[in-house]
Amino acid sequence: MDKQAVKNYLLQLQDNICAALQQVDGEVFVEDSWQRPEGGGGRSRVLADGNVIEKGGVNFSHVFGDGLPPSATAQRPELAGRSFEAMGVSLVIHPRNPMVPTSHANVRFFIAEKPGEEPVWWFGGGYDLTPYYGNEEDCRSWHQTAKEACEPFGADIYPRFKRQCDDYFHLKHRGEPRGIGGLFYDDFNELGFEQSFALTRSVGDSYTAAYLPIIERRRAEPWGERERDFQLYRRGRYVEFNLVFDRGTLFGLQSGGRTESILMSLPPLVSWKYDWQPQPGSAEAELLDYYLTDRDWLA
């Protein structure tokens, strides 16, 4: 098991994604390196008020410590009494144009060790798409790229990760999906270290291939105050999920992580409206009635 190889890959992945997004936007990410007093650190990169990206962050972190928070050991009692390392790249891109979907991606590696015992390790990650105005071409291309990234590792991988994504990115208190899904996996080690790592690289490397064509197709589409208002309203759902359900956010805050980096995923502007309902037959209603359903986009 080569932890350094995983770390090297993650650092390079952060570089590659930032370079690709900078080329699309024309502005550059600002880097903020940080250290965690309990052990480890990272580098946060943020692009704000860009030409395409209203706010985007691409974070790398590598943290370690002697013990895990109770929320982790309660679910995985075999981790109690072990030191841990967690490293990963996590990103969220909030475009300015409401016709361009928000996207999220994450790939990570976790290992917990104890002298005299075998290490407990796994990979996790995936990516998901959150449109404000639905487009079937974008949904199909997003999922097709995700499927192709998984295919070398087994015919069952994409449908399983797709289903797990639909289940995970679901606002239980609203009874609705956050977006149109993609891939999600966690606690993954069933292929052995080398192949599980290869799968994670395939997922991480395919993110820009999935997202950048969508940006290019939608970035120049016209929009106005109505579309902006709806975008800000739907961003509220994004905030609700990240603060109530997201495992990475909760683990980071409970384990003493860097708050600025953890909450980097939140959009710069958002609104909540009491019991707002879309006009029947509108594009806003279509998003809720057709696109935000757990459907097979490749059927």
Image (spheres, rainbow, N blue to C red):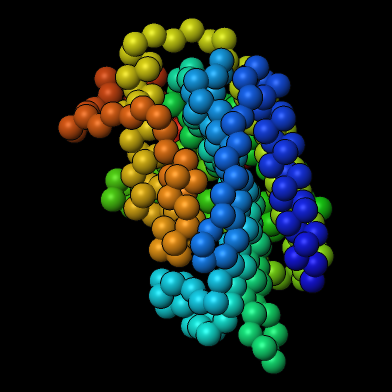
Q: Is 261 positioned to the left or the right of 184 in the image? A: left
Q: Quadrant of residue 139?
A: top right
Q: Left or right of 19: which side holds 215? A: left
Q: Position of residue 56 (x, y in %)?
A: 53, 32
The foreground one among 250 and 294 is 250
Where residue 156 sits: x, y (%)?
A: 69, 58
Q: Nearer the viewer, residue 248 or 165?
A: 248
**What residue lies at 59% left-to-right and 73% top-to-bottom?**
84
How many numbered marks does the figure carry? Answer: 0
Left or right: 131 as drawn, with respect to 278: right
Q: In terms of image quadrants, where is residue 111? A: bottom right
Q: Quadrant of the N terminus?
A: bottom right
* Residue 36 in picture, x, y percent from top left: 53, 58
130 shown above or below 96 = below
Q: Give residue 62's position: percent from left, percent from top.
A: 62, 58
Q: Residue furthest left?
A: 274
**Camera-nearest residue between 11 and 153:** 11
User: In the image as oriented, which residue stretches furthest toward the bottom?
Assistant: 116
What residue sits 46% from the left and 33% below the top?
A: 291
The image quadrant where one finds the C terminus is top right
Q: Residue at x 72, y 30 (%)?
A: 19
Can residue 119 be seen here? yes
Whether residue 154 is visible: no
